[in-house]
């Protein structure tokens, strides 16, 4: 398999939705560019506050903002970074002269449907990422050893669900 190609490209040709953590910004995509990847460059690390950015392209004509508009930060003379001004979620990388937006895969409601096909910016790759299968692995809230704590987190969560909603936040819940 070469960079940017997948033996099964059906993931590209379907409708996707997604958005930020608080639900103030939502999007709909009708087709993806065949470039899902991880970028380890220092600029992506800083923009996401993480060790890498997981991104996939969406051509402008296949992307609709369905709720709110992302804020933008010009991280260089040629690049905008999109984020939610309310919750701070990192949403995209955009070469201002390019034909597509590179959307954060984690912002999709169904990120598990998008395969990662290549890596870039390897000079910035954190050495520990090579050995992930050797470190302890535990679940998140659902796998907590404290069921009361996990229930309290679920009951008080302000996170938008992984599907489109007509109104958000629900009545009586501030974002």
Image: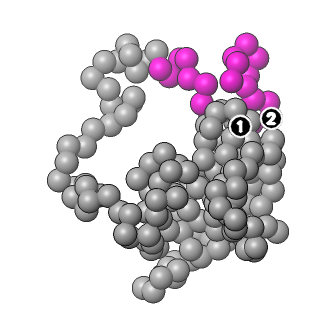
The percent position of residue 116, horizontal first and vertical second, equals 46, 67
Residue 104 visible at all: yes
Q: How crowded is mark 1: few (under 14 residues within 10 Å), some or many (20 or more)?
A: some
The reply to whether the C-beta atoms of the residues labelled 1 and 2 are less than 8 Å apart is no
Residue at the (37%, 13%) spot, across then down: 148
Q: Which residue is drawn at 70% across and 55% down?
A: 74
Of 145 and 63, nearer the camera is 63
The stretch of residues the image draws in magenta is 153-175
Q: Look at 73% across and 13% down and name the residue there.
A: 172
- 11 falls in the magenta region: no
Q: Position of residue 18 (x, y in %)?
A: 66, 48
Indicate the secondary structure of the residue bearing disc 1. Answer: loop
Q: Is residue 145 above or below residue 89?
A: above
> Would residue 18 appear left or right of 135 to someone viewing this image?
right
Q: Relative to the observer, which residue lies in front, 150 or 3? A: 3
Q: Which of 72 and 140 is in front in this view?
A: 72
- Rendered location of residue 51, percent (x, y): 40, 53
Q: Position of residue 105 (x, y in %)?
A: 56, 56
């Amino acid at each position: 398999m070469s960079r940017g190609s997948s033996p099964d490209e059906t993931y590209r040709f379907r409708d996707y939705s997604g958005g930020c953590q608080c639900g103030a910004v939502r999007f709909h995509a009708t087709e993806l560019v065949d470039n899902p990847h991880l970028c380890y460059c220092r600029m992506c690390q800083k923009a996401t506050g993480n060790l890498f950015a997981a991104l996939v392209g969406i051509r402008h004509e296949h992307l609709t903002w369905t709720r709110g508009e992302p804020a933008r930060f010009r991280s260089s003379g040629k690049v905008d970074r999109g984020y939610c001004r309310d919750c701070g979620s990192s949403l995209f990388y955009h070469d201002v002269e390019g034909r597509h937006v590179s959307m954060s895969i984690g912002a999709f409601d169904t990120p598990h449907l998008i395969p990662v096909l290549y890596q870039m910016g390897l000079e910035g790759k954190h050495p520990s990422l090579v050995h992930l299968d050797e470190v302890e692995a535990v679940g998140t809230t659902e796998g907590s050893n404290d069921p009361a704590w996990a229930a309290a987190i679920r009951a008080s969560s302000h996170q938008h669900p992984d599907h489109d909603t007509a109104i958000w936040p629900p009545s009586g819940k501030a974002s």
